[in-house]
Amino acid sequence: MKLHYFILSFILLGGLLAKEKNILVLGYWPPTNAIVQDFSNDAALNPGGWKGKNWQNLGYDIYSFFPTFPKGVKGENGRGEGNLEVDYQDTSRDFWKVVERIKPHAIIAFGLGRGPWEIEFNARNLAVENWRKDYLIPQFPLTKPDVTRADNFTLHSTLPVAKIAEKVNAADLGFKAWVDWQGDPGRFLCEYMAYHVMWYQSLHRNGKDACLAAGFIHVGGEVDVTSGKKALEITLQETIAHIKAKHKKTQSLLEILQQQQQKKIYVTCVEDHEVLQKLLPTTEKGVFYRYLGKNLQNLNGQSSRFFTSDANATFTGQYLNGVEVYAINVEHEQKIPYVDLKLGRSLLDD
């Protein structure tokens, strides 16, 4: 049954996804699977037809994935069937398959909780022994989600959480939306999923297919599906407005180089461009960026990291796709070639 869901879903997705701007919506236990159902393009799961194409003419296609619970949620039946079963191994495997195919610009995940519309701000990278048991052996993750991060490392939602809560409450749907700024999503599959979506966003925050927002919302069991769908619409509207605003400020390094036809880049922590102009020969024209989080005056010229916003960029020596990269050492008033170029998180901060 599970294989059927994935094959059918991916056949229906076809080869169009790479050309579209997509948003991914994920459900878990009821009522969240029913709330996101309209955005499934699988006719077996959504007989009413997919409603996600260029949703509300806002320029984004919405896709949803969720498990079903034909035998209820008690006991082992709580694992569910199909995509994203309530199981650590299954959820992680399905999640990475879906995001690789869809390349979402935003992810909104839902799960059953105290709600009523609890917008989680935090998700933790818990050690294996700190997760609660799921339904089938192995009942725990085989590793913590991100083995490169410390135990309990916390990621945060990048959804417009306060705005979502404000707008959902203004709609007077009969339940309260709120942001859980200090708490956690609960050490079970909901927190596991919450960490996955925030983790994906942190890894793909830049570039052509940047994921600009991701987060998790706990929905209370008392929320009826109709009202939940209205709250989901509001959540999507606010998220799309948010990522559109962010997208206007986001360009890849290579896009900037193409626009300005530059062959050299100078990276500096100095904000005063008059100082830079004194340091650089008048015949050399560069693109100036402020190096994030580092003071270049302290660099010795032997090793430093260059943060690029283009995940597809390739590095050879001190060149980035054929463009020579320099840092400016203001203290000694000399140019220092970057000799240790590594892919990082962000370049733009001008």
Image (spheres, grey):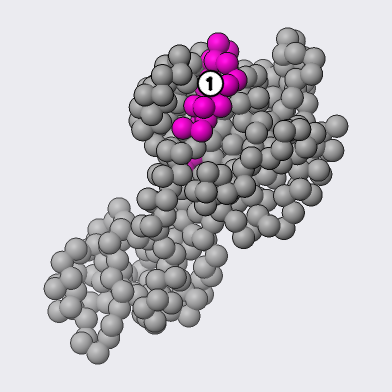
Above or below, comparing residue 306 to residue 153 in the picture: below
The quarter of the displayed image where residue 42 is located: top right
Q: Amino acid at mark 1?
A: Ser
Any magenta on residue 222? yes
Q: x and y percent of residue 241 in the render?
A: 41, 44
Say which of 143 and 213 sits in front.
213
The quarter of the displayed image where residue 266 is located: bottom left
Stretch of the chain drawn in magenta:
213-234
The quarter of the displayed image where residue 183 is located: top left
Disc 1 target residue = 227
Residue 277 is left or right of residue 250, and the answer is: left
Residue 216 is left or right of residue 138, and the answer is: left
Residue 248 is left or right of residue 67, and the answer is: left
Q: Is residue 53 visible?
A: yes
Q: Residues within 10 Å of mark 1 (few under 14, many from 20)?
A: some
Name the residue located 62 percent from the left edge and 42 percent from the top edge.
Answer: 52
Above or below, comparing residue 114 to residue 144 in the picture: above
Name the residue located 48 percent from the left edge and 63 percent from the top edge.
Answer: 310
